[in-house]
Image: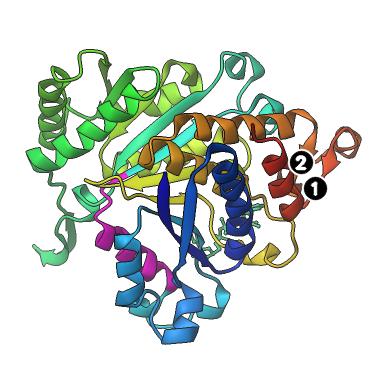
């Protein structure tokens, strides 16, 4: 298969971690007979420095025309004082809006080798944690009307939570499609005991469920879901929810797995052209020192293969390689135990070596 991937290295550790994801993708192409071509795209602080704009229109168009986008991270102290419209993160928001990616997908997976860095008890971890949160990304309360006014002599703030049936349906379908590619269990999370938008959410989810008879659909209230994520996370396969609930639940879920450097994400819209990036930022504090963990970016590339290119075997090959490298005791600095005696059991590796080891374990 031929695929054109737009590559945004970005700022801070972005270029280092993306380089290692490309090392892995190139090896996958060689093993499985694909051709991946890469289009470089400048976004974030580096684009501000070059063009005075965090995402020039021609760069956005390169992304829209690609088969998918792989992003490192953007931002850093250097650009903290530029005007709000010119901040590196504005480039990211414009990219998401320009690509029309309305669904953010974040897997929560516990790597057994890193279980010690999770705040959860071993008895909970032993049951296994491997689920994905599908979050609506461009609707709901974050995009509703926001206003602050004086009513009866008092400051009064209002934020509108609004969803249309079609907005719910399109994210609901992503939830079902994702479940179909996994263990076929979908949990729809809302607050239908209180909110009209949630009652509409629940009714739309059940209407479209008839089209996905292989998927088992359950409903859960968001407050219960927040509790279940720490109490019994192994019950989940795919969670689908609205923007604000997903924002909060996905941060909660990321904390139970250990290091932020391990977690990938994808954002998808109506087409298979997606945006794939690790969940962390540009980590300026460690940029250029070859100690960043590239695994979140490498696993984002694996998500791209699975969800945008339908290359399940190739994606699995990357995930297996990560598993083997961890299993052999290799650790980047962020996944090393803090206890000195414990850390002596592991082999400390840098960003480049981590990418190379994963490449060498691909089958
Ligand atoms: P951060 O995620 O960059 O870093 C938080 C901490 O985690 C730091 O100590 C960092 O060293 C560590 N860390 C992060 N990724 C790591 C990795 N792969 N390997 C090892 N350690 C890692 O968050 P921050 O420090 O709050 O933000 C730094 C910059 O990144 C800011 O300018 C922020 O706006 C930007 N940011 C960008 C994105 C994005 O591009 N999607 C997301 C979040 C933050």
Q: Is residue 144 above or below residue 83?
A: above
Quadrant for the N terminus in the image: top left
Task: Specify which label sits upstream in the sequence, 1 or 2.
Answer: 2
Q: CA distance from mark 1 to mark 2?
A: 6 Å
Type of secondary structure dominating the magenta stretch: helix
Quadrant for the C terminus in the image: top right
The answer to whether the beta carbon of the residue marked 2 is less than 8 Å from any atom of ligand 1 is no
Helix, strand or loop at mark 2: strand
**Residue stretch in magenta:** 88-103
Residue 323 at least partly seen: yes
Q: Is residue 83 above or below residue 237?
A: below
Q: Is residue 199 left or right of residue 258?
A: left
Disc 2 target residue: 331
Q: Is residue 250 above or below residue 53?
A: above
Q: Position of residue 216 (x, y in %)?
A: 27, 13
Q: Position of residue 143 (x, y in %)?
A: 20, 56
Disc 1 target residue: 349
Residue 249 at least partly seen: no
**Whereabouts is ligand 1, in terms of quadrant?**
bottom right
Residue 220 vs residue 79, the one in the foreground: 79
- In reply to whether residue 99 is colored magenta, the answer given is yes
What residue lies at 24% left-to-right and 30% top-to-bottom? 190
Q: Position of residue 289 (x, y in %)?
A: 75, 64
């Amino acid at each position: 298969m031929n695929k054109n991937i737009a590559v945004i290295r970005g700022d801070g550790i972005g270029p280092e971690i993306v380089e290692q994801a490309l090392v892995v993708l190139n090896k996958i192409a060689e093993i499985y007979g694909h051709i991946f071509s890469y289009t470089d795209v400048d976004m974030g602080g580096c684009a501000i420095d070059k063009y005075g704009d965090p995402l020039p229109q021609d760069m956005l168009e390169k992304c829209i025309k690609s088969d998918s986008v792989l992003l490192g991270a953007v931002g850093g102290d250097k650009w903290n004082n530029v005007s709000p419209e010119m901040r590196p993160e504005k480039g990211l928001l414009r990219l998401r809006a320009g690509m029309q990616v309305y669904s953010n997908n974040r897997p929560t997976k516990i790597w057994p080798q890193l279980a010690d860095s999770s705040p959860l008890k071993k008895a909970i971890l032993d049951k296994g944690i491997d689920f994905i949160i599908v979050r609506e990304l461009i609707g709901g309360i974050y995009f509703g009307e926001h206003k602050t006014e004086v009513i009866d002599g008092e400051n009064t703030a209002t934020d509108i939570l609004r969803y249309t049936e079609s907005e719910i349906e399109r994210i609901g379908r992503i939830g079902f499609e994702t479940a179909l590619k996994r263990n076929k269990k979908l949990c729809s999370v809302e607050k239908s005991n209180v909110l009209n938008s949630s009652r509409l959410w629940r009714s739309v989810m059940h209407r479209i469920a008839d089209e996905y008879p292989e998927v088992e659909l359950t409903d859960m209230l968001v407050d219960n879901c927040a509790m279940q994520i720490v109490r019994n996370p192994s019950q989940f396969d795919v969670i689908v929810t609205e923007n604000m609930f997903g924002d909060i639940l996905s941060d909660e879920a990321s904390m139970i797995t250990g290091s932020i450097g391990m977690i990938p994400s994808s954002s998808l819209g109506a087409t298979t052209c997606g945006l794939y990036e690790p969940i962390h930022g540009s980590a300026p504090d460690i940029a250029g020192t070859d100690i960043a963990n590239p695994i979140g970016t490498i696993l984002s590339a694996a998500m791209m293969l699975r969800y945008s290119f339908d290359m399940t075997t190739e994606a699995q090959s990357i995930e297996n390689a990560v598993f083997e490298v961890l299993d052999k005791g290799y650790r980047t600095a962020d996944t090393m135990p803090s206890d000195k005696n414990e850390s002596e059991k592991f082999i400390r590796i840098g960003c480049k070596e981590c990418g190379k080891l994963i490449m060498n374990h691909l089958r």
